Amino acid sequence: MNSTTASYEMRGSGDGRSKKQTMAELKLRRLQELNLRLKEDLDRRRIPVTQAAADLIDFTDKEPKDFMVPSKWGSIDKRDDPYAPPQSSGCCSVM
């Protein structure tokens, strides 16, 4: 029984140390991945909001009529609107 206790203690202390080391390596890897993502975010090109808004306005002025922006183009006839719900031909449908 004494030899069983000794082997149990050795195995337990060895596993505890390797488990701590594995957890530390995992934590280090996660921190390195986070650091890489933050560096990529830092390198991303940024523009002021006023410039982005002006670019969006210029884009909508140059592009053809957009049915999703009625405030810019005015009301649209239901026949020309591809997003209008389809008109039913009657009150009932037979299946």
Image (spheres, rainbow, N blue to C red):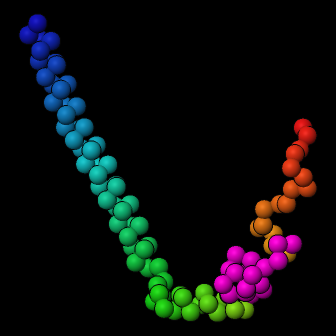
Residue 13 percent location from the top left of the image: 15, 30
Front residue of 12/44: it is: 44
Q: Is residue 86 above or below residue 43?
A: above
Q: Is residue 71 above or below residue 83?
A: below
Q: Quadrant of the C terminus?
A: top right
Q: In the image, which residues are magenta?
A: 63-79
Residue 10 percent location from the top left of the image: 15, 25
Residue 20 percent location from the top left of the image: 22, 41
Lateral position of residue 3 relative to residue 52, left or right? left
Name, please, the residue furthest toward the front. 91
Q: Is 67 part of what is drawn in magenta?
A: yes
Front residue of 33/89: it is: 89
Q: Is 44 part of what is drawn in magenta?
A: no
Front residue of 49/1: it is: 49
Q: Residue at x 85, y 60 (%)?
A: 87
Q: Quadrant of residue 70?
A: bottom right
Question: Looking at the magenta stretch, what is its main secondary structure?
Answer: loop
Q: Quadrant of residue 62?
A: bottom right
Q: Residue at x 68, y 80 (%)?
A: 69
